[in-house]
Image (cartoon, rainbow, N blue to C red):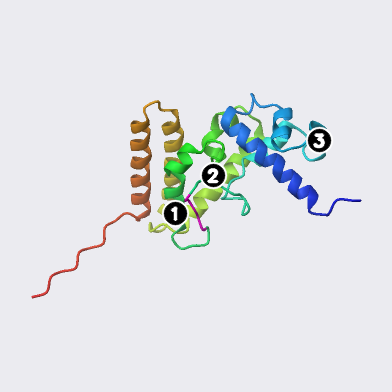
Amino acid sequence: MPYPASHRTKVKKKIVSSARRLFNRHGFEKVSLDQIMEGAGLTRGGFYSYFESKSDLYAEVLGCFFTDPEWQSCWDGVEVDLKSKGVGRDVIRAYLSIQHFEDVENSCPMVALPTDVTRSGPTAKRAFETVFAAMVSVLERSIHARGRDRHAVAQAMAALCIGGMVVARAMEDRRAADNLRNACMRVALALGGWNRRKPRARKTA
């Protein structure tokens, strides 16, 4: 009996999800196709029906919730509605959240895989650039900066989120890592104009 039309899509998603978890945890070079397929509950023989190579798969793994509407993060208690007016603020808080920090396997690949990308070919680099550009676009449309500064501010905010998390993950001292995350969050929110205090109401006579 033939598989339904949706079967191929579901299987491909399983492979990508398994690869994302393993690449985030161990890096591209240290993960084998056997491990990826085993993590997806499949046999190695079926891999080449979906991808030409491990590098081809890698480019798809670089997708994130900025580019894939069906991407499911497992950051407990963290939600981002890309259609909301305050999406920029929510993205920064989610990206630099303690949940994202601790959940390495379900990280945004821009945090977990940048060193792998620099050693990869143009396909992976273009995929990384696409995700970064999508993040910048999401931030840009909701920040308070005016005119030509909007894009530059959004780029700086995105770099603060990604770079802050990368450095925090590299720290042995957990308190220092948490302080860094929080500092990056405060500065990024300030760049977007989201952490300004509301002016106090004047007392009337």
Which residue position holds label 3? 48
Give how far apart the Cα atoms at labels 1 and 2 are: 17 Å
Does the stretch in magenta take in 196? no
Q: Which residue is mark 2?
A: 132
Which of the two residues, 50 or 5, is positioned nearer the viewer here?
5
Residue 36 location, quadrant? top right
The C terminus appears in which quarter of the rendering?
bottom left
**Dot 1: within a 10 Å radius of its alpha carbon, few (fewer than 14), some, or many (20 or more) residues?**
some
Q: Position of residue 115 (x, y in %)?
A: 55, 29
In terms of sequence position, does the residue under pointer 3 or pointer 1 come before the other? 3
Q: Quadrant of residue 41?
A: top right
**Hey, what amino acid is under mark 1?**
Asp
- Residue at x 42%, y 37% (from the top left corner): 164
Residue carrying label 1 = 90
From mark 3 to mark 1, how far is it between C-alphas?
38 Å
SS for callout 1: helix
Q: Residue furthest bottom?
A: 205
Determine contact: label 1, label 2, CB under 8 Å. Answer: no
At horizontal 41% and vertical 57% (from top left) the residue drawn is 143
Note whether residue 171 is visible.
yes
Q: Residue furthest left?
A: 205
Q: Indicate which label's residue lies in the foreground, 2 or 3.
A: 3
Percent x, y of residue 124:
64, 36
